[in-house]
Image (cartoon, rainbow, N blue to C red):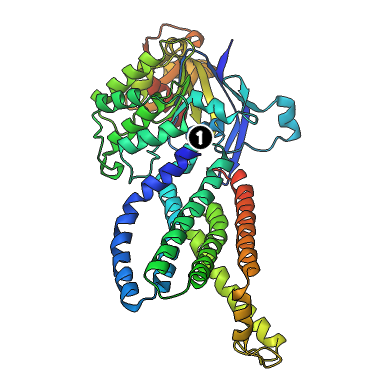
Amino acid sequence: MDYAINAVNVTKKYKGFTLDHVSLQLPKGSIMGLIGENGAGKTTLIKLILGLQTSQKDTASDKKSGSRITILNHELQSFPTAAREQIGVVLDDCCFPDTLNLVQINKIMQNIYKNWNPGCFNRYGELFNLPAKKAIKDYSKGMKMKLSIAAALSHHAKLLILDEPTAGLDPVVRDEILDVFMDFIQDEEHSILISSHITSDLEKICDYITFINDGRIILSDVKDDILSDYGILKCTQEEFQKIAPEAVHGYKRNSFGVTALVERQKVKGPFIIDPASLEEILLYNVRGK
Amino acid sequence: MRGIILKDLLSLKKQFIPMFLFFGIYIFIAIMTKDSSFLTGVLMIFCAMLPITALSFDERSGFSKYALTMPISRSMLVISKYLVTVILISCGGVISLLFSLFIGSASFMESVWSVVIIMLLGSLMVSVSLPPIFKYGVEKGRFIVIGSIMVLGFFGGAAAMSVSKGKLSTTLDKYGILWGAKMDAFFNSGLSLISLLAVSVVILLISLSISLVIYRKKDF
């Protein structure tokens, strides 16, 4: 399979946190959602993929396991600066100096990207209702996010890497932006890696989902497979004892009995298993016992 | 490269407006006293401060990490800050020289000297400030620069005094000849002007290479 991003055994150590041998494969032409709680390592992983941080120097064991990151068929270490034209990025905050306005940003970006399309940027500006002459410092949080998205989409990128792009936006605008992403992905050469806390957004648009918790990938698969493989089982305490422990990925006790996230295939017996949402899968994996 | 320099100049645009008002006062003083050297000093300090202000804008908005996701290399980002410094200080120099020639009562060579020396001080200020700022950020970097200059000044002075056994003089050399007489000879030579310019270019290049090494290893 041809991958837009292929990160293998990536490790980054901080004081009190380690992103531990993380692997992530985003096939070309698809959208992958990165889900995890605050501090799970989503932004660190995205920064490592973008080369903003360097991963831990290869130890002997890493060399054996082949720690490396490849983006659009280029090794990250030797990633040509010009090839960054093909990557559109939205980071967790709006990164333009706040004294600038939309017209000035259009001019600046025209001088940075060879493929910059000023007309396209203006169209997104109009679509997102961004005032052209207003300084960014007077923009709302949502407007700043929309500006970052407009910039990421205006230079004919093939890969979008988006860190919490829908955070702080109202449901109507979020829906609008998800439609823009869906339009972008119609080209089979295009791919998106998107991290978000808003799991309902990811459920709407993603083909693949990767759950990350405490610096480790706990699950990474096709979204539909995850949703069909996992379910929420409600039963009494006695019934719960009879379920194979390897089928249970987390459970909560309440006054009525037990609610558990289970793998459907591994549960034997006449139990009713309700569909699980991505949010429930995350919550039971992280908070469930 | 053009894009990031344009970004720095455009983001500094709003800084220029209060600057012009401020300079109005100094231009008035310069016209009244027929001496523009004070104006030159203020203008140049302002020009040397602007690249650091641009860096503080970048730091506040997180632009540097964003720029590195664009077709801009780490080296280009560092070099652009030095180029902005050279552009601003050169513009400041030309403007100061024009003022000095039209307002001041000094001769052409005197004007050139005063502008060049202040330009060199400006570029020295930026050369010393930028590497620690790239390493530690604008806030911490400024304190480190001020702190290290104070420490160097104190120990440098103490060392000079101890070497000269407390007889260090700023007006006479060890043979009792006035420093001022030597200074005249120094300032009359075109060679010293060129050497000073060369020294400041070398200092700027050393500072640039230190910043490049720092930035290459930096995590965002």
Residue B178 occupies quadrant = bottom right
Q: Is residue A78 left or right of residue A278?
A: right
Q: Is residue A289 in view?
A: no
In this rendered view, identify the residue nearer to me: B219 or B216: B216
Image x and y of residue B204, in percent: 60, 57
Q: Could you tell me which chain the residue with mark 1 belongs to?
A: A
Q: Is residue B88 above or below residue A264?
A: below
Q: Which residue is mark 1?
A: A41
Q: Is residue B63 above or below residue B174?
A: above
Q: Is residue B163 in view?
A: yes
Label 1 CA crowd tier, 10 Å (few <14, some 14–19, many 20+) = many
Image x and y of residue B62, in percent: 43, 43
In this rendered view, identify the residue nearer to me: A76 or A111: A111
In this rendered view, identify the residue nearer to me: B156 or A24: B156
Rendered residue at 62%/68% (across/down): B190
Amino acid, disc 1: Gly
Q: Is residue A55 left or right of residue A289?
A: right
In this rendered view, identify the residue nearer to me: A236 or B36: B36
Q: Is residue B113 left or right of residue B11?
A: right
Rendered residue at 34%/38% (across/down): A104
In the displayed orientation, state which residue is furthest to the top: A270
Image x and y of residue B164, in percent: 70, 88
Image x and y of residue A136, in percent: 30, 41
Q: Is residue A19 above or below residue A187?
A: below
Rendered residue at 37%/18% (across/down): A181
